[in-house]
Image (tube, rainbow, N blue to C red):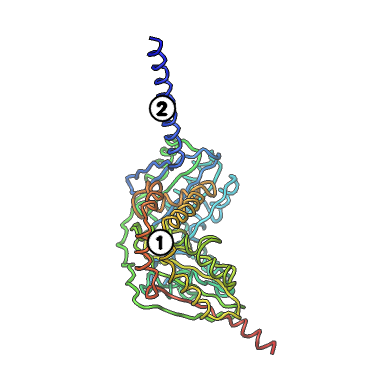
Amino acid sequence: MKIKSKWFVLMLFALLISSCAEEKEEQQKETAQFKVPVEYYKLDNGLKVILSKDTTSPTAIVAVYYNIGFRIEPKDRTGFAHLFEHMMFQGSQNLGKMEFIKLIQQNGGVLNGSTRFDFTNYFEIVPSHKLETMLWAEADRMRGLDITQENLTNQQGVVKNEVKVNVLNQPYGGFPWLDMPQYANTNWYNAHNFYGDLEDLDAANLEDVQSFFKTYYAPNNAAISVVGDFDIDEAKTWINKYFSNIPSAEIPEQPDISEPKQVEQKEFVKNDSLANKPAIALAYHMPERNTEEYYAMGLLDQILVQGDNSLLAQKLEKDKGYSSDVGGGINYLGNMFNYKGPMIWMYDFTYDNETSREEILSAIDEVMTNLKENITQKTVDQALVKLRSQLYDDIGGTFGLGRADLLCSFALFDDNPERINTLEDEFKKITPDIVKKTIDEYLINTNRTILTVNPLLADNEKTQSK
């Protein structure tokens, strides 16, 4: 009996150890597979609502995204979507001019807005106990803007000055973020000057603004996310109280924004009277969103241009010494997740006057020609580690603003904000063979556009020195 008793005790001890090991392994899996809490529903008027609780800090973010970006703004009204973004801060039914901004700042918060390819967004980051106030304020301007000729004229001047400062009077102004889409794309909706031609900005009238607001700034064309330290049931009550009685609108059918396949390499030169050395940008049309090639391009972006160990940075900066500022990515006005229509992957850099364009392209072609040979499982795994780090930096950054951005984007574009929790798994499915297939289909010269900046200031300096 003593022998059996000892055997039983040993078996029990072994089972306990095994159970503890399994429990520890499960805890490690849970830690590794961090999930963003997502509660998603819609109001009767069509407003998409996403709630995501995070008690890391006593703050709350309110982000409102409207499903209208500069990609589908009216023809002959370039820059109109951006102009309208400015109009949203000029007053609403209960808040006069600049009072919206004062309300947030006086309550210890920060705010901003932006216009992108496929959406216009507004957000506030405030102490948690001011969440209800922010929801009321956002609902107030969704319900109705103070659209006056005075406000419109004022903001036309503001936006025109912004164009002059950021583009027209700036060395490398608009390069390549504004320029390249106009050269690489052929469909007007993807290829027009979305910052706005000055004549088009002047041509905008009060009727345009009223029609644009009524058409696109309706609850059934919007998503709101609340991220931070708040009570879910309380937030639902406030959102229903302030937003549910805003009427929906008839949203027009979107125009065709598809981009025809590029079949030959395009090359352009931009003269820049303010630049003192040449610059170059190269762009490739992206695969369709959410395909395996799309995710493979995300990994190739990491392999080719992200970080000091990327292949192009190694070649152009470390090996050749041609540049010190190689950078790029998918979607220069956001990230690879927060757009809906056609997109380009692009990189750019400046280089010395003594270096020829031919030398630059020769070094680039050397990297691209040998790219497939560098694609191994180890390369893909390393790219995944870099991408995962960047993704979670974005999700957690600025008190969770990156999280609010993805939640609203996925709600607008896919009707599925839960996608935020599947991104890593999608990248993990990508094999070296899929990456190589993507290289063969997309990273080819016939899918490439090259834009070079010709530095006229450098030419003038050479002439003067002679």
Task: Work out which quarter of the rendered image holds the C terminus and state it.
Answer: bottom right
Among numbered discs 2 and 1, the one appearing first in the sequence: 2
Please, is residue 77 above or below residue 61 in the view?
Answer: below
- The residue at 52%/76% (across/down) is 360
Task: Work out which quarter of the rendered image holds the N terminus and state it.
Answer: top left
In this rendering, position of residue 435 left or right of residue 87: left
Q: Is residue 238 visible?
A: yes
Residue 447 position, x and y percent, is 38, 73
- The residue at 35%/57% (across/down) is 290
Residue 423 position, x and y percent, is 40, 50
Residue labelled with disc 2? 19
Name the secondary structure under disc 1: helix
Please, is residue 441 above or below residue 111 in the view?
Answer: below
Residue 169 position, x and y percent, is 59, 75
Report crowding for label 2: few under 14, some 14 to 19, many 20 or more residues within 10 A (C-alpha): few
Residue at the right extreme of this rendering: 465
